[in-house]
Amino acid sequence: MLKRIHVNQHNIRYNKKHGTNKPVITVKTSKSNDYGHEVNIKGESRVIYSPDKPLSCGAKVWIETKAEVKVVNKENRKEKTLGHISLG
């Protein structure tokens, strides 16, 4: 499953203005949007700059990967792994 990872500039500004710690990293798939403070990519990825064709959210730079991705959200202390295939 393709994952697109980008930084949410709105949340960075919000955190600075309000002294909060909202997650600023978004991981988008065809099934969900997940938000975190940290993302670990467990394989190959590529960084894309596309100013003429941004993502629907407006991001012009993002990372694409089909590898397993672990999203860490320190706000609610949750971790989620995307793209993990369990054989068993």
Image (cartoon, helix red, strand yellow):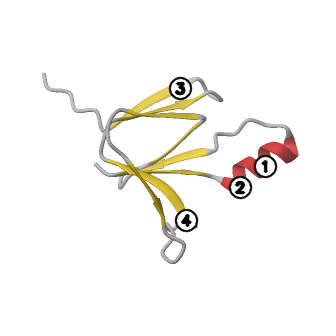
Q: How many neighbours does mark 2 have within 10 angstroms: few (below 14), some (14-19), or many (20 or more)?
A: few
Give me the C-alpha separation between circle 1 and circle 4: 20 Å
Amino acid type, mark 3: Lys
Q: How many neighbours does mark 3 have within 10 angstroms: few (below 14), some (14-19), or many (20 or more)?
A: few
Amino acid type, mark 1: Tyr
Q: Which residue is mark 3?
A: 78
Give me the C-alpha separation between circle 3 and circle 2: 22 Å
Name which residue lies at 54% across and 47% down.
Answer: 26
Residue 78 in the image, given as x and y percentages of width and height: 53, 26
Query: Looking at the image, do the residues carrying marks 1 and 2 touch, with CB atoms under 8 Å apart?
Result: yes
Of marks 1 and 4, which one's residue comes earlier in the chain?
1
Of marks 2 and 4, which one's residue comes earlier in the chain?
2
Q: Which residue is mark 2?
A: 10
Q: Is residue 70 above or below residue 57?
A: above
Quadrant location, the C terminus: top left
The number of numbered discs placed on residues in the rendered structure image is 4
User: For residue 80, what is the image quadrant?
Assistant: top left
Query: Looking at the image, do the residues carrying marks 2 and 4 touch, with CB atoms under 8 Å apart?
Result: no
Q: Which residue is mark 4?
A: 60
Residue 54 in the image, given as x and y percentages of width and height: 51, 70
Of marks 3 and 2, which one's residue comes earlier in the chain?
2
Give me the C-alpha separation between circle 1 and circle 2: 6 Å
In the image: residue 85, left or right of residue 41: left
Q: How many neighbours does mark 4 have within 10 angstroms: few (below 14), some (14-19), or many (20 or more)?
A: some
Amino acid type, mark 4: Lys
Q: Outermost residue, left direction?
A: 88
Name which residue lies at 42% across and 49% down.
Answer: 32
Query: Who is closer to the viewer here, 75 or 45?
Result: 45
Of marks 4 and 3, which one's residue comes earlier in the chain?
4
> Between tags 1 and 4, which lies in front?
4
**Numbered disc 4: secondary structure:** loop
In the image: residue 74, left or right of residue 44: right
